[in-house]
Image (tube, rainbow, N blue to C red):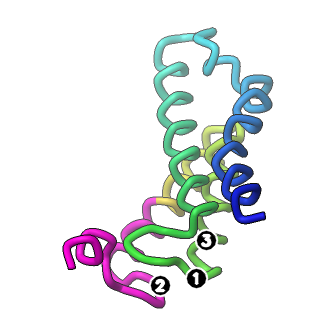
Amino acid sequence: MKIANQSLRLGLVAFVIPMVFMYQPALLMQGAWYEIVLSLGFAAFGIYLVGICLEGWYNGHLSWLPRTLFLIASVCLLFPQLWIHLVGAVLGITTLLVCRKSPFSSNKTSVVKKMSN
């Protein structure tokens, strides 16, 4: 069952992206160059935040609060309106910075330190 849950978490983005194509044709390189660049940037950042949310790891194991904030930010980044993109980007960057300075983790030992021991 652990393998099934892990594969679901890793493959979920592959099922979400085709749905985003319907709402953002700029991801299919249709539209002005600035729309394409903005859509690709916001979508890439949203996918990154979905990965953090689903894995529950960013500078340590995350509790439910930052994972929920990452999920909200990633959903906002995948909507087609610019103001929702900006809200998601601000929320995602703020949560990343807060988790970097004082991570919401139960185990603050990094993976690199664990592997070197």
Q: Main secondary structure of the magenta part?
A: helix
**Can you tell which quarter of the image residue 55 is in?**
bottom right
Label at residue 67: 3
The magenta-colored residue range is: 93-117
Q: CA distance from mark 1 to mark 2?
A: 6 Å
Please name the residue that numbered disc 1 is placed on.
Answer: 63
Residue occupying image coordinates x 44% and y 68%: 58
Position in image of residue 59 (x %, y %): 37, 72
Is the residue marked by circle 1 packed among few (<14), some (14-19), or many (20+) residues within 10 Å? Answer: some
Secondary structure of the residue carrying numbered label 3: helix
Q: CA distance from mark 3 to mark 1?
A: 7 Å
Q: CA distance from mark 3 to mark 2?
A: 10 Å
Q: Are marks 1 and 2 in contact (CB under 8 Å)?
A: yes
Quarter in which the C terminus is drawn = bottom left
Position in image of residue 100 (x %, y %): 34, 73
**Amino acid type, residue under disc 2 in the picture:** Phe
Position in image of residue 11 (x %, y %): 69, 43
Q: Earlier in the sequence, mark 3 or mark 2?
A: 3
Position in image of residue 17 (x %, y %): 70, 32
Residue occupying image coordinates x 66% and y 61%: 71
Secondary structure of the residue carrying numbered label 1: loop
Please name the residue that numbered disc 2 is placed on.
Answer: 104
Secondary structure of the residue carrying numbered label 2: loop
Front one among 52 and 97: 52
| Image-based side of 5 in relation to 82, left or right | right
Residue occupying image coordinates x 54% and y 21%: 35
Q: Are marks 3 and 1 in contact (CB under 8 Å)?
A: yes
Does the magenta segment cover residue 35? no
